Image (cartoon, grey):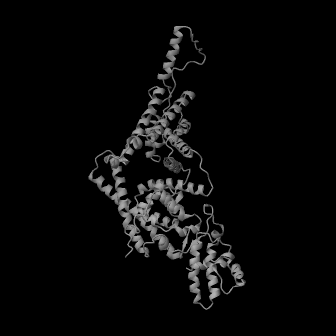
Amino acid sequence: MDIQRILIPKMIGKKLSKLNSHPSKTRFTYEQITATFKLDLQHPASNMCAKTWEVLKKEADGRKDKRMYMHIRILLLLSLWVPSWRTFKPNDMTIQSKMWILNTCQEIQHPWTDKCTNAVAGLLLSSTPYCLKVYTMVYMLSMLMRHKVPTKGDLYKMVLGILQSTAFLVTNAYTFTLFACLLRNLLGGFHISTVAFIPSVLSSFSAIVVERPKRRSLLALYVANVATETLWNMAEARGWVKSIPNGQALIFGSSISVLLYLYRLGLHQSNTCKDSMFDILRIFVGKTEEGPLKSLQLTNEEPANQSRTPINLTSISGLVQIYSKFLGAIKGRHQCCPHQVSCLHYVLMGGLRPLLGGISLQVALKILLNIKNIIQMKVKWHKNMFNAKTLNLGLFMGCFSLLYKAASCTLRHSFDCDDARFAIPAGLLSSISFIFYPDITVALYVMWKMLQIIYNVGIERKYVPSMPGFTMILYTLCTATLFHAGIVEPRTLRASYFKFLQAISGERFCKFQLGPLDAFGYDTGRATEEVRHRLRIINKSPLPKWSLADW
């Protein structure tokens, strides 16, 4: 396929006529060409195009019709650069400059070897140990969390699961380079979509087919979580949207309110809505708030026409009566409340237990992550372990439970009934506690879990149609979005996922030569260097692991 013929714009004829009418038309300079097209010589692509000019000039010297041949080739080349070269702004991501670049895959994705097969094979060999280590840890932790001694059958299934999941992740890694090189060789150049997005679509779909069906939904939710944040960052970089303070608390509050409403309705007990998310909610709000609600009939109600005896504040009996009412308010509970203790005790203890549990969990995680420094006696306990940030998770968990239970009991006292709809305002109020632990990952995870459960309920009740393979499609598109962001727009990608791409590629990700991608208008080269510097990613050696450069 001659991609150059396809991409010749209509305006090339007018520009060619203008050059042919130039006084010195027998020999044109590079400056005359750029002046004709009104191009900016300070553009980053100018140097590359100038070098290409010299190459084509030497090539045209050996032709009979030197002038016309050279002019057509140079005009064709420059026409591919015109849209961005005339309108490029270094910090303006709202402009997508041009559609194609003619660089080879070696110049961008595997500069250490000139053979695509070696690049693919090297990535296959280097990614396998890392993927095997990752899934060994995942499956072992999953086995430990079952709190039982594994049998031989359990160990056999675990080994098979590790191997299958490792094959899935390795396939996703090496087939990306495979499809990227294949598309480059077929098309003769890189389109903005063939740099990362389309190759990742093909590789991700090939990989998710390898993974076990039970794990596909979990993987899809994870990448959807990261992709949602990435898409928001892309839109914000283009000026389409604007972040608001504590916006993650709004996402968390609206999502958790819907889940709490389903929890109070008791829908979580059906096969359609069974999910580990409701087990987490049970830890926060307790089993007593679990639905379905029991119908309760109020007793000991005072007749409507019975008048209350006024309290005499000057007598001892009146003071005793006030004191007894105060104790009743503290120790008593509404008949509609599902708990057996007083509402005050229920609210306070409901907040204290998650508070202590969250602090303990945060300390345990910090000890686990700093175990090496602890053994070497290099850790500063007051600075790294027991600081103000250690309280954040506990404050979030404790305040969430306290506010939810306080709001629920207040609504039951106010309306003299218990209703599952009370979970919505109670959930919104309790989400204020998210300001103590404003983690966007948690907020998006809860949102996607809510959408998944609502979608399953809609399918069960025939409100929405069932889409076969929706999980695989979601995983494929979200992973492709992340690969595109990591290569073309690295500023928009979450730092932890950028490090993951670096690790799974055998440290190849930081060796990509992404400068030519600046032609697409995203300032990719400089953005990549900024991200690498911020994450302290250093090229330890000129060649990656298993480079196969000498093969």
- When the figure is inspected, residue 242 is found, relative to residue 431, above or below; the finding is below
Name the quarter where the C terminus is drawn.
Answer: bottom left
Q: Position of residue 304 (x, y in %)?
A: 60, 19
User: Toward the viewer: 60 or 483?
Assistant: 60
Q: Residue furthest bottom?
A: 64
Q: How many marks?
A: 0
Name the quarter where the N terminus is drawn.
Answer: bottom right
- When the figure is inspected, residue 119 is found, relative to residue 316, above or below; the finding is below
User: Toward the viewer: 184 or 237?
Assistant: 237
- When the figure is inspected, residue 185 is found, relative to residue 347, above or below; the finding is below
Lateral position of residue 254 relative to residue 373, left or right? right
Task: Using the rendered image of the protein, determine whether residue 204 is visible from the camera's viewpoint.
Answer: yes
Q: Residue furthest left?
A: 152
User: Toward the viewer: 425 or 49?
Assistant: 49
The structure residue drawn at horizontal position 47% and vertical position 30%, both measured from the top left corner, is 347
Q: Position of residue 5 (x, y in %)?
A: 61, 80
Task: Using the rendered image of the protein, determine whether residue 480 is visible from the camera's viewpoint.
Answer: no
Q: Position of residue 57 (x, y in %)?
A: 59, 84
Q: Position of residue 186 (x, y in %)?
A: 51, 76
User: Toward the viewer: 242 or 536?
Assistant: 536
Lateral position of residue 353 relative to residue 19, left or right? left
- When the figure is inspected, residue 236 is found, relative to residue 21, above or below; the finding is above
